Amino acid sequence: MHKESPLAHEASLAAADQGKFWEMHDLLFATQAKWVQARSSAKAAESEPVPTLRDDLIAKAAQLNLDVPRFTKDLDTHRFKPKSTRTARKATAWA
């Protein structure tokens, strides 16, 4: 599991709460490689800052026309962290 996966999972659950789980899921997977590459390039070059994952997730929420203040609050308060943690434990147990 990637170190950024827990927050991305929380974001997909926050999107699900607004009826857009699959849209967020598809957007995350479509842009995952690009985001990781941008982070790696920026660290190597130490030049221009790369948006944080949080900022990127909020931008994706806006792109999906979610209620961005609500989505942001869900991320910042980790509203869906307990559910995300339970799901991750189940997945690990199955592996």
Image: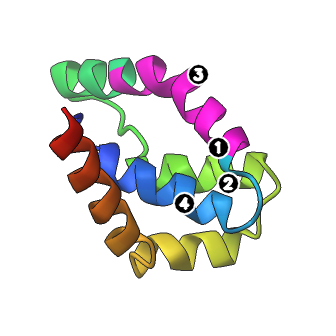
Which is more foreground, mark 3 or mark 4?
Answer: 4
Tag 3: amino acid: Ala
* Residue under label 3: 30
Between the C-alphas of marks 3 and 2, the distance is 14 Å
With respect to residue 58, does 37 lie above or below? above
Residues marked 1 and 3 touching at CB (< 8 Å): no
In this orientation, which residue lies closer to the viewer: 46 or 10?
Answer: 10
Q: Amino acid at mark 1?
A: Met
**Disc 4 target residue:** 13
Query: Label 3 neighbourhood size at 10 Å, few (<14), some (14-19), many (20+)?
Result: few
Which residue is labeled 2 in the image? 61
Q: Which corner quadrant holds the C terminus?
A: top left
Rounded to the nearest angstrom, the CA distance separating label 4 from label 2 is 12 Å
Which residue is depicted at the point 72% across and 40% down? 23
- Label count reads 4
Residue 95 within the magenta-colored segment of the rendering = no
**Which region shows up in magenta?**
22-36
Query: Percent x, y for residue 19?
Result: 77, 60
Residue 10 got which mark? none
Tell me residue 38's x, y (percent).
38, 23
- Tell me which corner region of the image, top left, top right, bottom left or bottom right, holds residue 85: bottom left
The image position of residue 33, as x and y in percent, is 42, 18
